[in-house]
Image (cartoon, rainbow, N blue to C red):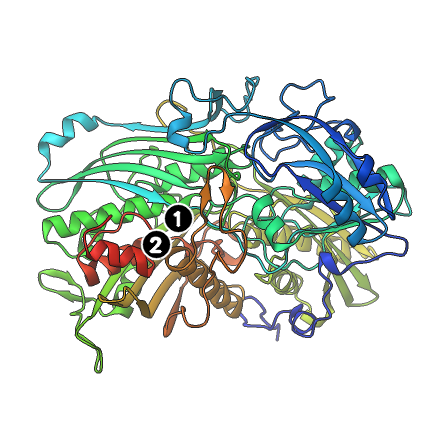
């Protein structure tokens, strides 16, 4: 009887090596004769680099070389658009490459025989700066007379949302119905201003790379990343090399969460190895990592929503200004997702939404788990909770009255591909887990009573929020993933190797690939091996982001398995097949109306929170979180549970303890002693994970993406629960003791 592997909670194949310390991460690699690199950051938010005097650095014993902008063959890079210099400084014909636009811009790279010598050389560099006026508030950056941070760029037809007007980098809009006419029909209108903070990724492993020339003469980089082939493209471009002359090897990754989707140390390490023909290693400190890599976008928003007396939505008008920071990174795509989620999964006949991404002299905004959906969801779900309160309706009941279903169009004019089949089920599962009950009058929230032993100053609150998010890339991009399978043996398949350039950033992708391959091939899983992610032996499987990897690589593996088995049956030995899976085609959204078919699949989640607050101290304690996720099909339930738990805790950190603070373009929370990630004392007493399975028609074995989803609704659920406990709507977070106490006292 054939064994089934899909749906089995098998242990991770990389688990033993990681827990015993045997798994090598990028910072663990060393080579004989290697050099060490340190980078000089700008250290100021906005300045022109007039020159770099390296004479004192080169005089340090052990210093081998100092590289500046003049050493970079093509001094530009960028995931969405090449608006960032590799090294800021004079000497490049492209306008603006001599300007540093945030404190983490790289000015020079010092290479030495030891790390200590490289650091001393870096500290002795003399950089001549011309200080330039800085703008650090995205709203001020849009005002007439604000310093313009980038020269005018040519149009980019593949990204119509990139507009480059003054400091406006991107713009997204939705226009549906007649919002202005709807206000007069409303029984209640809720208008709110929100400020949603940035967030540091705080992955365990800071950025690191080892670059060298391999036996084939290729510039080779061992580095943790989320998309090795995209890294290769950008590195090759900056070095002026054909892509095939650059090789990326992906080791174990100590966390990413979107923070390793953009380049950090890879180009400069590769540049030095190419120039010096010796291995070069660089490892960032925690402070360098916090200063040097992008963050979740800091967002300002105003939302005005209306409903009739029955709680049915009539109109939603929302304006969002997001801090893109110094460079585009993935701002345009992040804000595309924010646009799609900022009106929730609800029937709204009249919608007017504008989302702006604005250049400032702050640390750039970029990819982070949820990719714009957490910010959009916080706005939408907070508005729903406020409307429920204004109408005297239960928050679950008002959502049920407005949820899309059976082909209802979303604000962008198209229904969800599967009619949002998991929305209601997720909502009700989370609600029931928190104690909601259905009555003849509709759904009713649990009575919140003090717990035995609670002092009279401690007040309880419950909150709930619903979320959805796209799976995979979108907005017209032809989503794809490559995989190959090679079968070996004689009369039977004795071994199978899967080739896929899929990053495993801690979610267990390699384990899931192995399970899916064993299932598709019908062979014992012990015979299946997953080859390393190495650009020399794989083609692109796309980024490990957008909750896409299981969906995309699973379909590619399934196709490769079928093709390899066909060759095997034809007695081809070994039998090897390659397949590039193409996801259903999407379309861009219209830049004026926002209409289009932007995504081919979505994931659904609901989350409820039960907490208490000491009204004398502001101390917040989370007793229970219930998170219900429609994952389509859980390929490995153990890994799904781990993703839910990790996403919930990471989101709880964002909403309670973490606070990325910049002042005048300078990060003030540049260490883990000032940027406070949650500890064991901050996590919920109980975290209930509810795995729901409504098969995704296009997913492998019905699987949806789900890695980002548990993060998304936490902030809005916390927002409501804190309100229930204090009577205050806190439209800014984190919900720390200071902010809570100020709200209770009426000091905002």
Residue at point 32%, 57% (across, down) = 735
> Could you say which is closer to the camera, residue 712 or residue 485?
712
The residue that label 2 is drawn on is: 715
Note whether residue 215 is visible. Answer: yes
Above or below for 152 versus 114: above
Q: Residues within 10 Å of mark 2 (few under 14, many from 20)?
A: many
Quadrant of the rendered structure where residue 571 is? Answer: bottom right
Note whether residue 424 is visible. Answer: no
The N terminus appears in which quarter of the rendering?
Answer: bottom right
Q: How far, Cα to Cα, is label 1 from label 2?
A: 8 Å
Above or below for 582 versus 595: below
Q: Is residue 534 left or right of residue 744?
A: right
Residue 705 in picture, x, y percent from top left: 49, 53
Q: Is residue 182 left or right of residue 132?
A: left
Quadrant of the rendered structure where residue 86 is? Answer: top right
Residue 417 in picture, x, y percent from top left: 40, 43
Q: In this view, does 747 lie to the left or right of 319?
A: left
Above or below for 449 versus 133: below
Residue 342 in picture, x, y percent from top left: 33, 41
Q: How crowded is mark 1: few (under 14 residues within 10 Å), some or many (20 or more)?
A: many
Q: Is mark 2 on a helix, strand or loop?
A: helix
The image's mark for residue 374 is 1
Q: Do the residues labelled 1 and 2 touch (CB within 8 Å)?
A: yes
> Could you say which is closer to the camera, residue 318 or residue 327?
327
Above or below for 685 versus 416: below
Q: What element carries label 1?
A: helix
Residue 518 in picture, x, y percent from top left: 65, 65
* Sooner in the amino-acid sequence: mark 1 or mark 2: 1
């Amino acid at each position: 009887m054939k064994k089934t592997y899909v749906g089995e909670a098998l242990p991770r194949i990389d688990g033993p090596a990681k827990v015993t310390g045997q798994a090598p991460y990028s910072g663990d690699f060393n080579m004989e004769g290697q050099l060490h690199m340190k980078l000089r950051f700008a250290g100021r938010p906005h300045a022109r680099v007039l020159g770099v005097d390296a004479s004192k650095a080169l005089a340090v014993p052990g210093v081998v070389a100092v590289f500046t902008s003049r050493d970079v063959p093509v001094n530009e890079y960028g995931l969405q658009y090449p608006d960032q210099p590799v090294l800021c400084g004079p000497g490049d014909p492209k306008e603006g490459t001599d300007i540093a636009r945030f404190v983490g811009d790289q000015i020079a790279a010092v290479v030495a025989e030891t790390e200590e010598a490289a650091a001393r050389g870096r500290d002795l560099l003399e950089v001549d700066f011309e200080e330039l006026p800085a703008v650090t508030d995205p709203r001020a950056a849009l005002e007439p007379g604000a310093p313009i941070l980038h020269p005018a760029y040519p149009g980019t037809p593949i990204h119509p949302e990139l507009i480059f007007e003054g400091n406006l980098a991107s713009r997204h809009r939705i226009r549906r119905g007649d919002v202005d006419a709807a206000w007069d029909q409303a029984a209640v209108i809720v208008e709110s201003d929100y400020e949603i903070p940035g967030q540091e990724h705080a992955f365990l492993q800071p950025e690191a790379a080892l670059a060298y020339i391999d036996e084939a003469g290729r510039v080779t980089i061992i580095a943790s990343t989320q998309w090795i082939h995209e890294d290769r493209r950008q590195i090759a471009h900056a070095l002026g090399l054909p892509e095939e002359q650059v090789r990326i090897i992906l080791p174990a990754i100590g966390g990413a969460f979107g923070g390793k989707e953009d380049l950090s140390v890879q180009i400069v390490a590769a540049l030095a190895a190419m120039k010096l023909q010796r291995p070069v290693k660089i490892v960032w400190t925690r402070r360098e990592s916090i200063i040097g890599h992008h963050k979740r976008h800091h967002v300002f928003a105003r939302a005005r929503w209306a409903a009739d007396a029955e709680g049915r939505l009539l109109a939603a008008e929302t304006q969002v200004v997001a801090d893109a920071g110094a460079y585009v990174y993935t701002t345009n795509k992040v804000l595309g997702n924010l646009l799609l989620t900022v009106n929730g999964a609800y029937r709204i006949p009249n919608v007017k939404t504008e989302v702006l991404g604005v250049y400032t002299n702050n640390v750039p905004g970029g990819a982070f788990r949820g990719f714009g959906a957490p910010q959009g969801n916080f706005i939408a779900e907070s508005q729903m909770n406020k409307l429920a309160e204004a109408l005297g309706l239960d928050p679950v009941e008002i959502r049920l009255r407005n949820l899309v279903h059976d082909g209802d169009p979303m604000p962008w004019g198209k229904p969800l591909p599967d009619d949002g089949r998991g929305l209601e089920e997720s909502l009700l599962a989370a609600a029931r887990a928190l104690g909601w009950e259905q009555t003849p009058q509709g759904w009713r929230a649990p009575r919140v009573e003090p717990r035995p032993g609670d002092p009279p100053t401690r007040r309880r609150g419950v909150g709930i929020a619903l979320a959805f998010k796209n799976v995979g890339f979108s907005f017209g991009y032809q989503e794809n993933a490559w995989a190959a399978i090679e079968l070996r043996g004689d009369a039977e398949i004795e071994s199978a190797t899967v080739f896929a350039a899929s990053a495993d950033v801690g979610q267990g992708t390699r384990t899931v690939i192995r399970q899916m391959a064993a299932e598709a091939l019908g062979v014992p899983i012990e015979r299946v091996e997953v080859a390393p992610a190495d650009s020399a032996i794989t083609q692109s499987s796309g980024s490990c982001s957008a909750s896409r990897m299981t969906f995309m690589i699973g379909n590619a593996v399934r196709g490769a398995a079928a093709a390899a088995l066909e060759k095997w049956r034809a007695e081809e030995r070994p039998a090897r097949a390659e397949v590039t899976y193409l996801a259903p085609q999407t379309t861009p959204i219209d830049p004026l109306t926002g209409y289009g078919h932007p995504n081919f699949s979505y994931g659904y989640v609901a989350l409820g929170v039960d907490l208490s607050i000491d009204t004398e101290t502001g101390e917040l304690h989370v007793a229970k979180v219930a998170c219900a996720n429609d994952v389509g099909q859980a390929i490995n339930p153990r890994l799904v549970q781990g993703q839910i738990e990790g996403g919930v805790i990471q989101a709880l950190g964002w909403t309670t303890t973490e606070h990325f603070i910049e002042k005048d373009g300078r990060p003030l929370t540049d260490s883990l002693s000032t940027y406070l990630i949650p500890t064991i004392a901050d996590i919920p007493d109980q975290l209930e994970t509810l795995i729901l399975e409504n098969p995704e028609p296009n997913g492998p074995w019905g699987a949806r993406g789900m890695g980002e989803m548990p993060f998304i609704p936490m902030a809005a659920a916390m927002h409501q629960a804190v309100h229930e406990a204090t009577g205050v709507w806190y439209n800014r977070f984190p919900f720390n003791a200071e902010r809570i106490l100020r709200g209770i006292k009426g000091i905002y």
